[in-house]
Amino acid sequence: MTLGTRLLTWLRGEYVGTDSLGNRYYREKGRRQLMRGGGRESREKRWVIYAGAPEGSKVPPEWHAWLHHTVDELPNPARKRYPWEKEHRPNMTGTPYAYHPPGSILRGGKREPSYGDYEPWTPE
């Protein structure tokens, strides 16, 4: 968190909630009169204070929708989860938990040999 974000949060921030990863969400206090026509004055200011390193993929979808004004209602943590919904996971690239497909150099570089219609190119 930068000094500017810390000051904005302290002076003008209204705490609205926390997600399952510990990120805290705020909006501007004192609901000012919003103007029509788009631009900065047509929406309230909303922001997140990340738990740990600031990484945009650590924001769950329901909070992402609220931050970007897709929905106006705050996410309900007690809402019914469907059986097909998976738990949100942040981007794991660059961590030991990153996905490496079979044959990847980072996974050992071994892959199944190719058979069938594959013929390697050789220069003439």
Image (cartoon, rainbow, N blue to C red):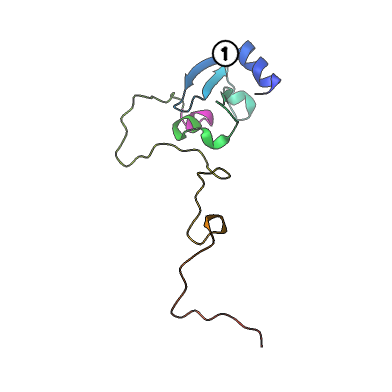
User: x, y (%) of residue 27?
Assistant: 55, 19
Q: Which residues are magenta?
A: 65-71
The residue depicted at 39 percent of the width and 36 percent of the height is: 87
- On screen, residue 85 above or below 3: below
Task: Say which residue appears at 44% left-offset and 32% top-offset.
Answer: 62
Nearer the observer, 67 or 30: 67
Does the image show residue 121?
Answer: yes
- Dot 1 lies on which element? loop
**Relative to 73, is 114 above or below?**
below
Q: Position of residue 78 (x, y in %)?
A: 34, 24
The quarter of the image holding the C terminus is bottom right
Q: Is residue 7 left or right of residue 106?
A: right
Considering the image in quadrants, where does the N terminus appear?
Answer: top right
Residue positioned 51% across, 64% down in the render: 110
Q: Magenta span has 9?
A: no
Q: Nearer the viewer, residue 39 or 100?
A: 100
Return the residue nearer the eye: 50 or 94. 94
Residue annotated with mark 1:
29
Asked if the stretch drawn in magenta spans residue 67, the answer is yes
